[in-house]
Image: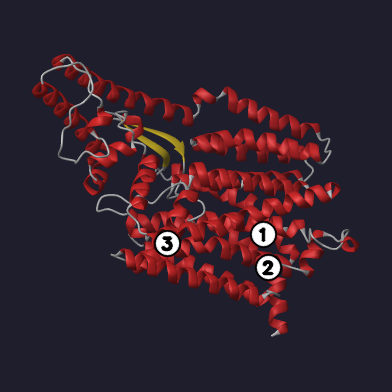
């Protein structure tokens, strides 16, 4: 057994490198599998990959009891979660189990990578190189999609006349938000990899294609990440007293180019055109409200029409000038019909499930099509209404995946922290967040205790972590998508490995991080 373990440890750096390099290949395979209705194949491949990582890390781990304790805790929590959903009623086991597995993969992968790095510190040093090659593969896939005459764009916008506009270069990757997170989080350690080559021309080329890829992807997150990355990497170099002026110049010029090119960016054009379309639609609604107001000589307050104590079929009297009750009722009826048609157009299945009054109230009776058509907000409001209808057990352990699925739409939230909260409840989200927070706190303590040993690689990893957390909250599709969360897991494991035993006894304070981690891996 010891010989097998030693062989696995020796193979760890190479195995981990290829594990990550094949990730964009698996993403492309998932894209085409979805087109050909063969998603079960790629799902099985990813599950086998997950199982292989778990088995490999367990084989080389020095803390097998900790691993077993983690898996047992997850299993017990899922049993309680399933019981809560069963009590709530209409429990669909397989879809919920698959969703829970996606949530659980992130902490499991993290512990797996920590164990691998503890057994083979050299494996961690392959990650920047792997990220560099992943970015090359992604850019090649985007180029190939155009060469093949089958490009995929980040956004498409349909105008009222039926014409379409396309924004952003996505390539053969299925989920735009998830891919935007991936292309961003790859950049800091890719820049570190290029910087370590100590060649300004190499750094300029790598920084150019990495940051240009963010600019042309077309989302707000990728665009604004350019400034965060350029500033963050420059500060990282300054903290480490690096004096390669050409590198600072490249970072400043890249940020300046992105700023100057704002109004030519896909991000700006998409947002501007979308707002223009929605503004025209809102103008039509406002004109209709004005017509009703002039017709009956009364201002109708929609917050009263859709008040909390008003049944869906009831039209109450409302505030305004004193007019005959019948006219007032007719005016209120027209306004209610106008709003109902508007909400059914944009939120039809929400109205069908929760009723027009509850849906109108959660939107504060807005008539702004820009707000009503915002799919991210729509998913949040659907989840909030579902949460209101959930029992105590579900609020403790989370509701099932099917809760956010209707015959027409899947309302699975894009914002990861909120989405994870609804699926694991109060008793699940607290340890989940503490698990994430532990690593930057650990790094901060390490930095404060021993500033001289802070490295560019560690600070680049922390920058990546900040970007991933921002992506999880504001872009989404990170924590609960294994093809993205695997990157977060390895970043946390890298931070853990590089910070070493931060609470070591004073006599061992000078121990190198990797050596300390090798002696005492894990939390």
Q: Residue at x 63, y 33 (%)?
A: 227
Image quadrant for the N terminus? bottom right
Q: Is residue 332 left or right of residue 131?
A: left
Give the image location of residue 319, x and y in percent: 23, 22
**Disc count in the image?**
3
Q: Is residue 131 above or below residue 297?
A: below
Which residue shows up at 65% across the image and 76% down it? Answer: 64
Rendered image: mark on residue 116: 2
Secondary structure, mark 2, is: helix
At horizontal 34% and vertical 53% (from top left) the residue drawn is: 404
Q: Mark 2: give few (<14), some (14-19) or many (20+) Cα within 10 Å.
A: many
Instruction: Tell me what residue is drawn at x 46 percent, y 49 percent.
Output: 418
Q: CA distance from mark 2 to mark 3?
A: 26 Å
Q: Nearer the viewer, residue 416 or 299?
A: 299
Tag 2 near tag 3, CB within 8 Å: no
Image location (x, y in percent) of residue 22: 55, 59
Q: Nearer the viewer, mark 2 or mark 1?
A: 1
Quadrant location, the C terminus: bottom right
- Disc on res. 99: 3
| Tag 1 residue | 493
Q: Is residue 16 left or right of residue 505?
A: left
Query: Which residue is the extreme one toward the left?
Result: 326
Q: Is residue 239 left or right of residue 183?
A: right
User: Does 235 appear above or below 457?
Assistant: above
> Tag 3 or tag 2, which sits nearer the N-term?
3
Residue 454 place in picture, x, y as percent? 80, 48
Judged from the image, the secondary structure of the residue bearing numbered disc 3 is: helix
The residue lying toward the viewer, choosing from 261 and 485, is 485
């Amino acid at each position: 057994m010891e010989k097998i373990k030693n062989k696995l440890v020796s193979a760890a750096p190479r195995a981990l490198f290829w594990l990550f390099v094949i990730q964009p290949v698996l993403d492309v395979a998932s894209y085409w599998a979805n087109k050909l209705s063969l998603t079960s194949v790629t799902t099985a491949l990813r599950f086998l990959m997950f199982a292989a990582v778990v088995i490999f890390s367990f084989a080389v781990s020095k803390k097998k009891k900790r691993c077993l304790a983690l898996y047992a805790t997850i299993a017990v929590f899922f049993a309680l979660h399933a019981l809560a959903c069963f009590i709530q009623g209409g429990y669909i086991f397989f879809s919920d189990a698959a969703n829970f597995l996606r949530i659980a993969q992130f902490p499991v992968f993290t512990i797996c990578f920590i164990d691998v790095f503890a057994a083979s510190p050299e494996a961690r040093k392959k990650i920047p190189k792997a990220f560099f090659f992943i970015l090359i593969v992604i850019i090649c896939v985007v180029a190939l999609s155009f060469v093949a005459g089958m490009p995929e764009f980040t956004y498409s916008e349909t105008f009222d006349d039926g014409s379409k506009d396309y924004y952003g270069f996505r390539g053969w990757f299925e989920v735009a938000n998830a891919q935007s997170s991936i292309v961003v989080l790859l950049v800091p350690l890719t820049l570190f990899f290029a910087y370590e080559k100590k060649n300004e021309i190499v750094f300029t080329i790598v920084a150019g294609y990495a940051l240009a890829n963010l600019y042309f992807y077309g989302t707000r997150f990728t665009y604004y990440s350019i400034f965060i990355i350029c500033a963050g990497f420059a500060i990282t170099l300054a903290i480490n007293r690096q004096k390669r002026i050409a590198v600072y110049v490249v970072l400043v010029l890249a940020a300046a180019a992105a700023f100057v090119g704002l109004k030519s960016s896909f991000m700006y054009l998409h947002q501007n055109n979308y707002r223009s379309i929605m503004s025209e639609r809102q103008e039509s609604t406002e004109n209709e409200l004005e017509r009703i107001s002039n017709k009956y000589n009364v201002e109708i307050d929609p917050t009263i029409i859709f008040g909390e104590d008003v049944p869906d079929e009831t039209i109450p009297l409302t505030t305004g000038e004193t007019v005959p009750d019948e006219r007032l009722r007719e005016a209120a009826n027209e306004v209610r019909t106008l709003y109902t048609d508007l909400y059914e157009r944009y939120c039809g299945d929400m109205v069908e499930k929760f009723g027009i009054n509850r849906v109108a109230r959660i939107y504060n009776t807005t008539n702004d099509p820009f707000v009503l058509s915002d799919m991210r907000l729509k998913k949040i409001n659907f989840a909030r209404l579902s949460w209101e209808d959930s029992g105590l057990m579900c609020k403790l352990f989370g509701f099932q995946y099917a809760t956010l699925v209707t015959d027409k739409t899947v309302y699975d939230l894009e914002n990861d922290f909120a989405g994870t909260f609804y699926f694991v409840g109060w008793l699940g989200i607290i340890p989940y967040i503490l698990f994430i927070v532990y690593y930057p706190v650990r790094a901060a303590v390490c930095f404060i205790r021993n500033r001289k040993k802070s490295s560019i690689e560690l600070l680049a990893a922390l920058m990546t972590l900040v970007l991933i957390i921002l992506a999880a909250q504001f872009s989404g599709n990170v924590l609960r998508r294994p093809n993205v969360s695997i990157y977060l897991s390895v970043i946390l494991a890298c931070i853990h490995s590089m910070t070493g035993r931060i609470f070591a006894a004073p006599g061992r304070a000078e121990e190198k991080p990797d050596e300390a981690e090798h002696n005492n891996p894990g939390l």
